[in-house]
Amino acid sequence: MIKNLMIPSDGSKYSQKAVEFGIELAYKINAYIIAIYILDENKSDSYDSLEDEGNKILANITKKANKKGVKVLEHLITGNPLRDMKIIAIRTNADGIIVHIHGKDESEKGTIGSVANRIIKTFEIPIILIKD
Protein backbone atom coordinates (compact mmCIF):
# COMPACT_ATOMS: atom_id res chain seq x y z
CA MET A 1 0.00 0.00 0.00
CA ILE A 2 1.29 3.44 -0.89
CA LYS A 3 1.25 5.85 2.03
CA ASN A 4 4.22 8.10 1.20
CA LEU A 5 4.05 9.41 -2.34
CA MET A 6 7.20 11.22 -3.48
CA ILE A 7 6.79 14.03 -6.02
CA PRO A 8 10.00 15.75 -7.10
CA SER A 9 9.44 19.14 -8.70
CA ASP A 10 11.67 21.56 -10.57
CA GLY A 11 8.88 24.11 -10.95
CA SER A 12 8.47 23.48 -14.67
CA LYS A 13 5.06 23.30 -16.33
CA TYR A 14 5.71 19.58 -16.75
CA SER A 15 6.40 18.91 -13.09
CA GLN A 16 3.27 20.88 -12.19
CA LYS A 17 1.23 18.27 -14.07
CA ALA A 18 2.84 15.55 -11.97
CA VAL A 19 2.08 17.55 -8.82
CA GLU A 20 -1.58 17.99 -9.76
CA PHE A 21 -1.95 14.29 -10.54
CA GLY A 22 -0.12 13.37 -7.35
CA ILE A 23 -2.34 15.52 -5.16
CA GLU A 24 -5.47 13.92 -6.63
CA LEU A 25 -4.05 10.43 -6.18
CA ALA A 26 -2.87 11.13 -2.63
CA TYR A 27 -6.34 12.42 -1.79
CA LYS A 28 -8.01 9.30 -3.19
CA ILE A 29 -5.70 6.80 -1.47
CA ASN A 30 -5.24 8.80 1.75
CA ALA A 31 -1.47 9.16 1.30
CA TYR A 32 1.04 11.78 2.31
CA ILE A 33 3.00 13.69 -0.29
CA ILE A 34 6.75 13.95 0.06
CA ALA A 35 7.49 17.08 -1.98
CA ILE A 36 11.10 17.24 -3.12
CA TYR A 37 13.11 20.11 -4.56
CA ILE A 38 16.77 19.49 -5.28
CA LEU A 39 19.16 22.42 -5.31
CA ASP A 40 21.41 21.27 -8.13
CA GLU A 41 24.95 21.37 -6.79
CA ASN A 42 26.25 21.75 -10.36
CA LYS A 43 24.42 25.01 -11.10
CA SER A 44 26.35 28.26 -11.05
CA ASP A 45 23.40 30.32 -9.77
CA SER A 46 23.62 31.70 -6.27
CA TYR A 47 22.56 29.32 -3.54
CA ASP A 48 20.18 31.91 -2.08
CA SER A 49 18.26 32.35 -5.35
CA LEU A 50 18.00 28.58 -5.85
CA GLU A 51 16.88 28.12 -2.25
CA ASP A 52 14.25 30.86 -2.62
CA GLU A 53 12.96 29.24 -5.82
CA GLY A 54 12.81 25.82 -4.15
CA ASN A 55 10.98 27.14 -1.11
CA LYS A 56 8.38 28.84 -3.32
CA ILE A 57 7.84 25.67 -5.33
CA LEU A 58 7.45 23.55 -2.21
CA ALA A 59 5.12 26.09 -0.58
CA ASN A 60 2.95 26.07 -3.70
CA ILE A 61 2.69 22.26 -3.61
CA THR A 62 1.78 22.34 0.06
CA LYS A 63 -0.85 25.04 -0.47
CA LYS A 64 -2.52 23.10 -3.29
CA ALA A 65 -2.43 19.82 -1.39
CA ASN A 66 -3.74 21.32 1.85
CA LYS A 67 -6.77 22.66 -0.02
CA LYS A 68 -7.61 19.01 -0.76
CA GLY A 69 -6.83 17.91 2.80
CA VAL A 70 -3.60 16.16 1.78
CA LYS A 71 -0.61 16.43 4.13
CA VAL A 72 2.77 17.33 2.69
CA LEU A 73 6.29 16.78 3.98
CA GLU A 74 8.62 19.24 2.25
CA HIS A 75 12.28 18.45 1.56
CA LEU A 76 14.71 20.98 0.09
CA ILE A 77 17.94 19.13 -0.62
CA THR A 78 21.27 20.07 -2.17
CA GLY A 79 22.59 17.44 -4.53
CA ASN A 80 22.53 16.07 -8.05
CA PRO A 81 19.04 15.07 -9.24
CA LEU A 82 20.36 12.25 -11.41
CA ARG A 83 22.64 10.82 -8.76
CA ASP A 84 20.64 11.43 -5.60
CA MET A 85 16.97 10.81 -6.44
CA LYS A 86 16.98 7.18 -5.27
CA ILE A 87 18.87 8.04 -2.08
CA ILE A 88 16.29 10.72 -1.31
CA ALA A 89 13.44 8.24 -1.89
CA ILE A 90 15.01 5.79 0.54
CA ARG A 91 15.73 8.42 3.19
CA THR A 92 12.20 9.83 3.01
CA ASN A 93 10.59 6.36 3.10
CA ALA A 94 8.82 6.93 -0.20
CA ASP A 95 6.86 3.92 -1.35
CA GLY A 96 5.75 5.43 -4.66
CA ILE A 97 6.88 8.24 -6.96
CA ILE A 98 5.16 10.43 -9.52
CA VAL A 99 7.28 12.23 -12.07
CA HIS A 100 6.65 13.81 -15.46
CA ILE A 101 8.66 12.38 -18.33
CA HIS A 102 10.08 15.90 -18.96
CA GLY A 103 11.75 18.51 -16.82
CA LYS A 104 12.84 22.06 -17.54
CA ASP A 105 15.08 20.96 -20.40
CA GLU A 106 12.97 21.59 -23.51
CA SER A 107 15.56 19.80 -25.66
CA GLU A 108 14.34 16.49 -24.21
CA LYS A 109 10.79 17.08 -25.45
CA GLY A 110 9.50 14.02 -27.26
CA THR A 111 11.71 11.65 -25.29
CA ILE A 112 11.94 10.59 -21.68
CA GLY A 113 14.04 13.11 -19.76
CA SER A 114 17.27 12.18 -18.04
CA VAL A 115 15.85 12.27 -14.49
CA ALA A 116 12.75 10.23 -15.38
CA ASN A 117 14.94 7.76 -17.27
CA ARG A 118 17.22 7.35 -14.26
CA ILE A 119 14.21 6.79 -11.99
CA ILE A 120 12.85 4.09 -14.29
CA LYS A 121 16.19 2.29 -14.34
CA THR A 122 17.05 2.46 -10.64
CA PHE A 123 13.91 2.60 -8.50
CA GLU A 124 12.34 -0.48 -6.96
CA ILE A 125 9.15 1.27 -5.82
CA PRO A 126 6.05 1.92 -7.94
CA ILE A 127 6.59 4.71 -10.49
CA ILE A 128 3.91 6.73 -12.22
CA LEU A 129 5.13 8.62 -15.27
CA ILE A 130 3.04 11.57 -16.39
CA LYS A 131 2.97 12.43 -20.07
CA ASP A 132 1.08 15.16 -21.90
Image (cartoon, rainbow, N blue to C red):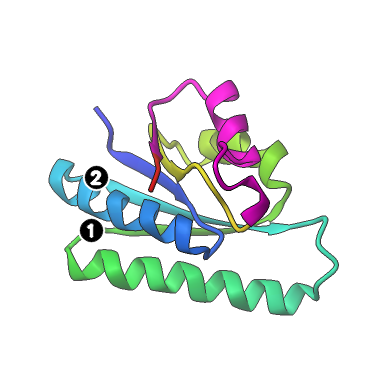
Whether residue 73 appears in this view of the structure is yes
Q: Residue at x 56, y 31 (%)?
A: 119
Q: Is residue 5 left or right of residue 83?
A: left
Residue placed most toward the observer, 74 or 13? 13
- Total numbered labels placed on residues in the image: 2
Q: Give the percent coordinates (x, y) of residue 89.
A: 52, 37
Q: Is residue 51 left or right of residue 59?
A: right
Q: Which mark is residue 122?
A: none
Q: Which residue is mark 2?
A: 31
The amino acid sitting under disc 2 is Ala
Q: Is residue 30 magenta?
A: no
Q: Residue lying farthest front?
A: 110
The crowding category of the residue bearing disc 1, from other C-alpha atoms within 10 Å (few below 14, some 14 to 19, many at least 20), is many
Q: Which residue is mark 1?
A: 70
Q: Give the percent coordinates (x, y) of residue 85.
A: 61, 40
Q: Give the percent coordinates (x, y) of residue 38.
A: 63, 56
With respect to residue 77, does 59 lie above or below?
Answer: below
- Numbered range of the magenta stretch: 105-129
Q: Is residue 5 left or right of residue 121?
A: left
Q: Residue at x 29, y 69 (%)?
A: 64
Kind of element beneath mark 1:
loop
The crowding category of the residue bearing disc 2, from other C-alpha atoms within 10 Å (few below 14, some 14 to 19, many at least 20), is some
Q: CA distance from mark 1 to mark 2?
A: 7 Å
